[in-house]
Image (tube, helix red, strand yellow):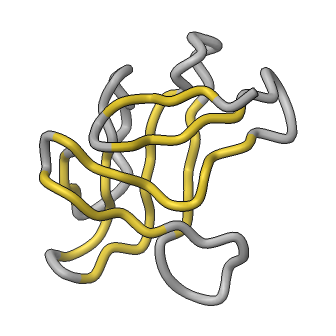
Amino acid sequence: MTVEPDVPDRIAPKRLYVVGDPGHYWLAVMKCPCGCDSDIQLPLSGNDWPRWSVDGADSAPTLRPSIHRTTGCRSHFLLRRGKVVWCR
């Protein structure tokens, strides 16, 4: 997990970026783990729904709830302790 003040221009695969200030994050950004090369942006604060939470060590973050893409590749997965867990 990498903390950034703004969304990076280039999103590296297999890396979760958390955007915001330490202790107040508002966005999580990552490449889709299926390999389709799509960027995924998940709100962490505000009135958006759904809204995700991120916790855990920098090297092993957990996102809640699951990520279910409703367009494109339609992947559905969890990020638990830094590992992608595919949903069926």
The quadrant where residue 49 appears: bottom right
Position of the C terminus by quadrant: top right
Q: Residue at x 33, y 41 (%)?
A: 16
Q: Nearer the viewer, residue 66 or 5?
A: 66
Query: Which residue corresponds to the image point at 19% horizontal and 46% vertical from the top-left?
Result: 2
Relative height, residue 22 to residue 43 (above, below) = below
Residue ID at (13%, 40%): 59
Residue 25 location in percent, x, y? 32, 74
Could you tell me residue 66's position as x and y percent? 61, 50
Quadrant in which the N terminus is drawn:
top left
Q: Is residue 61 left or right of residue 34?
A: left
Q: Position of residue 44 (x, y in %)?
A: 47, 72
Image point (38%, 20%), residue name: 13
Outermost residue on the top side: it is 35
Residue 43's image quarter? bottom right
From this view, report whether residue 51 is shown above or below residue 54: below
The answer to whether 20 appears left or right of 69 in the picture is: left
Q: Is residue 60 left or right of residue 84?
A: left
Question: Which percent across, then down, holds residue 81?
Answer: 28, 43
Question: Is 21 above or below relative to 84?
Answer: below
